[in-house]
Image (cartoon, rainbow, N blue to C red):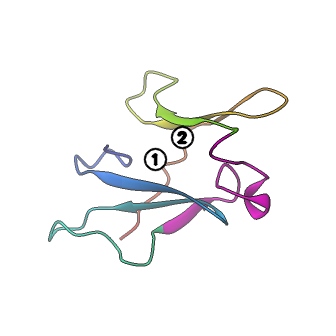
Amino acid sequence: MDTTGDGRPGVVVLAADGVRASSQDDAGTFAPTGGKLVLDAFGHGRQAGGWLADKHPRFLVGTTGDGHVDIVGFGGPGVYVARNLFRRFRAR
């Protein structure tokens, strides 16, 4: 999924410290370090806001019609949206 609008696929990881993202470089590879931390919540575990994969589904979807993906998460008390997160992200 193109997360940055550069026409290249990106990888999004729900990690212990939050959401990490990596975009494809000119050679077609991704950063081996797991990407850049772009949000310290929505990840997996206590350190990332208490989100758990088996209890709190999260989706990458467009919510504004601007062509960029956002994160929508379903937590205990409700629905949360992180908008424009990847537009600001550049992993290179």
Are dots 2 and 1 in contact, CB under 8 Å? yes
- Residue ID at (26%, 62%): 24
Secondary structure at numbered mark 2 = loop
Residue at numbered disc 1:
87
Query: Most prominent secondary structure in the magenta stretch?
Result: loop
Q: Quadrant of residue 17?
A: bottom right
Q: Is residue 73 above or below residue 7?
A: above
Up-down: is 66 above or below 31? above
| Residue 42 covered by magenta stretch | yes
Q: Residue 70, position in %: x, y?
A: 52, 36
Residue for point 61% across, 35% down: 57
Q: Amino acid at mark 1?
A: Arg
Residue 53 placement (x, y as % from top left): 62, 46
Q: Position of residue 44 (x, y in %)?
A: 66, 56
Decide: is 52 above or below 67: below
Q: Is residue 38 above or below residue 35?
A: above
Count the marks: how many? 2
The local secondary structure at tag 1 comes to: loop
Q: Position of residue 65 (x, y in %)?
A: 43, 21
Q: Quadrant of the C terminus?
A: bottom left
Instruction: Tell whether 41 sits left or right of 91.
Output: right
Q: Which residue in the structure is indicated by mark 2?
A: 84
Crowding at mark 2 (Cα within 10 Å: few <14, some 14-19, many 20+): some
**On the picture, is 32 further left or further right than 29?**
right
Q: Amino acid at mark 2?
A: Asn
Asked if the magenta segment contains residue 25, the reply would be no
Closest to the observer, 12 or 39: 12
Range of residues picked out in magenta:
36-54
User: Quadrant where the N terminus lies?
Assistant: top left
Residue 22 in the figure: left or right of residue 48: left
Q: Nearer the viewer, residue 55 or 10?
A: 55
Q: In the rendering, which numbered label is found on residue 67?
A: none
